[in-house]
Image (cartoon, helix red, strand yellow):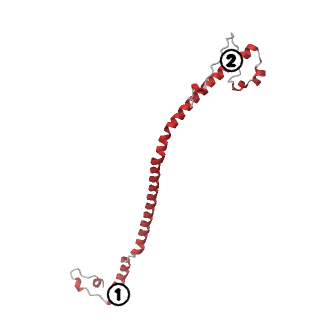
């Protein structure tokens, strides 16, 4: 029986099948034909969906890139010239701040000199630091509470007073 199912290699035209083997062959052919059948529409739909998703993301990305480019163009066209225009004002403001720092430093030196003169005057007059310290508005700015007692009383020299027009231009 096996010999009758296997066709001879030398003569394929001489194959004769019985009705039973023909039915089995047809059934086998139908079963294998189901494997060969492909429903490409379902598989292609998933590819089309993936392609549409990628295209939508690319369009979103392109719109984001266009927004960034328009913002950078606006920055280059509008904000950078404004910054360049205000550069001189910033330099002028920096100079004024430096002059103000110099005035504050000079005021600090003058205040220190004045405190030393007040301490010397208190020591010379023998005024208690506690009593006069409460009335002296400069006592709040003292750095130390040590009283200065000079060995020799110096001559009174008025402190150097600064003037604002020495540091600021009159405008």
**Looking at this rendering, what residue extends furthest in the top direction?**
152
Q: On the image, numbered disc 1 is attached to which residue?
A: 23
Residue 57 pos. (x, y %):
45, 61
Query: Which of the numbered marks, if any, corresponds to residue 117?
Result: 2
With 45 as the anchor, is 147 left or right in this view? Answer: right
Q: Nearer the viewer, mark 2 or mark 1?
A: 2
Q: What residue is rendered at 60% in x and 26% in y?
A: 164
With 158 as the anchor, is 135 left or right in this view? Answer: right
For label 2, count other residues whose C-alpha is less than 10 Å away and answer few (under 14), some (14-19) or many (20+).
some
Q: Measured along the vertical axis of the image, is residue 130 above or below residue 2?
A: above
Q: What residue is rendered at 48% in x and 41% in y?
A: 85
With 7 as the anchor, is 87 left or right in this view? Answer: right
**Looking at this rendering, what residue extends furthest in the right direction?**
131
Q: What residue is rendered at 41% in x and 69% in y?
A: 48
Q: Measured along the vertical axis of the image, is residue 137 above or below residue 63?
A: above
Q: Choose between 150 and 100: the one closer to the eye.
A: 100
Residue 69 pos. (x, y %):
44, 53
The answer to the question of whether label 2 and label 1 lie on touching residues, with beta carbons closer than 8 A, is no
Alpha carbon distance from label 2 to label 1:
130 Å
């Amino acid at each position: 029986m096996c010999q009758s199912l296997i066709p001879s290699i030398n003569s394929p035209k001489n194959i004769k099948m019985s009705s039973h083997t023909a039915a089995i062959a047809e059934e086998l052919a139908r079963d294998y034909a189901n494997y060969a059948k492909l429903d490409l529409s379902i598989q292609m739909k998933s590819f089309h969906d993936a392609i549409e998703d990628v295209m939508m993301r690319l369009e979103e990305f392109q719109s984001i890139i266009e927004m960034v480019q328009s913002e950078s163009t606006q920055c280059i066209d509008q904000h950078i010239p404004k910054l360049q225009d205000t550069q001189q004002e910033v330099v002028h403001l920096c100079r004024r701040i430096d002059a103000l720092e110099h005035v504050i430093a000079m005021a600090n030196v003058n205040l220190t000199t004045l405190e030393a003169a007040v301490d010397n005057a208190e020591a010379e007059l023998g005024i208690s630091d506690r009593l006069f310290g409460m009335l002296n508005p400069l006592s709040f700015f003292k750095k130390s509470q040590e009283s200065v007692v000079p060995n020799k009383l110096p001559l009174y020299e008025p402190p150097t007073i600064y003037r604002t027009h020495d540091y600021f231009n009159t405008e």
